[in-house]
Amino acid sequence: MLLKDSGMRIRVEKELRDAFVQACRAQDRAAADVLRDFMRAFTEKQQQGQASLFAGTKRK
């Protein structure tokens, strides 16, 4: 298990938070786990996008 030693605080509308928590509970998942999964997927996608900028270039 990875050490979770950093926190993040965000402000969202109460209705959005409540709907998100309810959707997570409906899937028997903790909201924090869903957010971490999203963050991992998002950063991986961004890293792949940056790598693809240089994939087709050749050095002279």
Image (cartoon, rainbow, N blue to C red):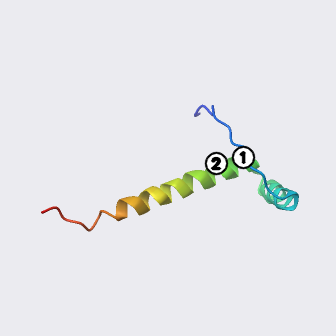
Report crowding for label 1: few under 14, some 14 to 19, many 20 or more residues within 10 A (C-alpha).
few
Q: Is residue 58 above or below residue 3?
A: below
- Name of the residue lying farthest toward the bottom: 56
Report crowding for label 2: few under 14, some 14 to 19, many 20 or more residues within 10 A (C-alpha).
few
* Location of residue 30 in the rendering, given as x and y in whole percent from the top left corner: 76, 47
Which residue is at a point 69% across and 47% down the rendered structure image? 33
**Image quadrant where one finds the N terminus:** top right
Which residue is at a point 44% across and 56% down the rendered structure image? 47
- Name of the residue lying farthest toward the left: 60
Q: Which residue position holds label 1?
A: 32
Q: Residue 3 carries which label?
A: none
Looking at the rendered structure, the number of numbered marks drawn on it comes to 2
Q: In this view, does 12 lie to the left or right of 5?
A: right
**Which amino acid lies under the numbered mark 2 shown in the image of this protein?**
Arg
Q: Circle 2 — which element?
A: helix
**Which amino acid lies under the numbered mark 1 shown in the image of this protein?**
Ala
* Location of residue 41 in the rendering, given as x and y in whole percent from the top left corner: 55, 56
Which residue is at a point 73% across and 44% down the rendered structure image? 9
Q: Is residue 7 above or below residue 55?
A: above
Which residue is at a point 68% across and 51% down the rendered structure image? 35
**Image quadrant where one finds the C terminus:** bottom left
Q: Which mark is residue 36?
A: 2
Between 10 and 26, the one lying in front of the other is: 10
Q: Is residue 34 left or right of residue 39?
A: right
The alpha-carbon separation of the residues under discs 2 and 1 comes to 6 Å
* Location of residue 20 in the rendering, given as x and y in whole percent from the top left corner: 79, 58
* Location of residue 22 in the rendering, given as x and y in whole percent from the top left corner: 84, 57
Q: Circle 1 — which element?
A: helix
The reply to whether the C-beta atoms of the residues labelled 2 and 1 are less than 8 Å apart is: yes
Q: Is residue 6 left or right of residue 18?
A: left
Q: Quadrant of residue 48?
A: bottom left
